[in-house]
Image (cartoon, grey):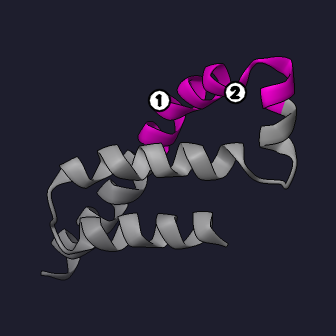
Amino acid sequence: MLGTILLLVVTVCGYLNLSFLVLVPASVLASFIGLHFPQGKADLAKERGMYWKVFFYALPIQAVFLTILFGFGWGINVLIH
């Protein structure tokens, strides 16, 4: 649920022409949310000693995906206005 809300917020931020720097904390938050869903996934990663490795490997993937959504919102604003 939180991940979906984050994706919608990033798209709206693009639509409102906010600074693209909003993608930096959003990417960190998306990586954190992705690492903790489903329940127990983060605990398993901690037990195996892979928690930070998984977190930092997911960061660029999340950043690219959120950039696409931000651009989608920005593009809708350009088309409407």
On screen, residue 80 above or below 48:
below
**49 relative to 62 in the view: left or right:** right
The answer to if 51 sits in the magenta stretch is yes
Kind of residue at badge 1: Pro
In the rendered structure, which amino acid carries the disc numbered 2?
Tyr
Identify the magenta region: 45-65
- Per the image, label 2 sits on a secondary structure element best described as helix
Q: Residue at x 80, y 29 (%)?
A: 45
Tag 2 residue: 51
Q: Residues within 10 Å of mark 1 (few under 14, many from 20)?
A: some
Residue identified by numbered label 1: 60
- Does 69 sit left or right of 31 as displayed? left
- The kind of secondary structure the magenta stretch mainly shows is helix
Disc ID at residue 12: none
x, y percent for residue 61: 53, 33
Tag 2: Cα neighbours inside 10 Å, few (<14), some, or many (≥20)? some
Q: Nearer the viewer, residue 46 or 62?
A: 46
State the image quarter where residue 52 is shown.
top right
**Which quadrant would the N terminus be assigned to in this image?**
bottom right
Q: Is residue 54 left or right of residue 20?
A: right
Residue at (38, 64) in percent of width and height: 10
Picture layout, residue 14 above or below residue 50: below
- Residue 40, compared with residue 57, is above or below; it is below
Helix, strand or loop at mark 1:
helix
Residue 11 position within the rendered picture, expressed as x and y whole percent measured from the top left: 38, 67
Mark closer to the chain start, 2 or 1: 2
Q: Residue at x 26, y 54 (%)?
A: 22
Which quarter of the rendering shows the C terminus? Answer: bottom left
